[in-house]
Image (cartoon, rainbow, N blue to C red):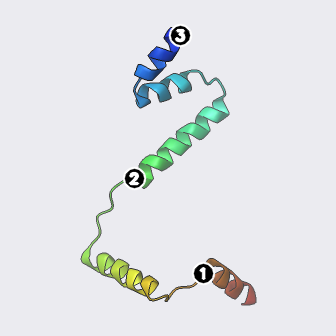
Amino acid sequence: MNLSINIEVMLTIKEKIIKRIEGINDEELLQDVYTLLLDIVETRQILILNDEQKLKIEEARIDYKNNRFYTNDHVFNDLLQN
């Protein structure tokens, strides 16, 4: 049995990521990975909404359920015509 495979299975996901990153020598790729991590962290932040924002979101959900929305194609075509 290959010892390196057993060690790999025992590593946590965080340790696996760190191990892979340590093996990268391409600065441009490392910058891309860093930027991606920052984007992921920023998008996972919890948003605290006020009552007005919650109401607007609920109204938008109701509009969507009642098919009161525009597709991307519709909006794009509308922009091109103006």
At label 2, counting other C-alpha atoms closer than 10 Å, the crowd grade (few under 14, some 14-19, many 20 or more) is few
Q: Which residue is mark 1?
A: 71
Choose the circle earlier in sequence order: 3 or 2: 3
Q: Which mark is residue 2?
A: 3
Q: Looking at this rendering, what residue extends furthest in the right direction?
A: 81
Q: Earlier in the sequence, mark 1 or mark 3?
A: 3
Earlier-in-chain disc, 2 versus 1: 2
Circle 2 residue? 44
Amino acid type, label 2: Arg
Q: Are marks 2 and 1 in contact (CB under 8 Å)?
A: no
Residue at (43% x, 51% y) in the render: 42
Crowdedness of circle 3 by 10 Å Cα count: few (<14), some, many (20+)? few
Residue type highlighted by circle 3: Asn
* Residue at mark 1 to residue at mark 3: CA–CA distance: 54 Å
Cα gap from disc 3 to disc 2, whole angstroms: 38 Å
Cβ atoms at labels 3 and 2 below 8 Å apart: no
x and y percent of residue 18 in the render? 48, 26
What residue is at 33 percent from the left and 61 percent from the top?
47
Query: Image check: 44 left or right of 1?
Result: left
Q: Nearer the viewer, mark 1 or mark 3?
A: 3
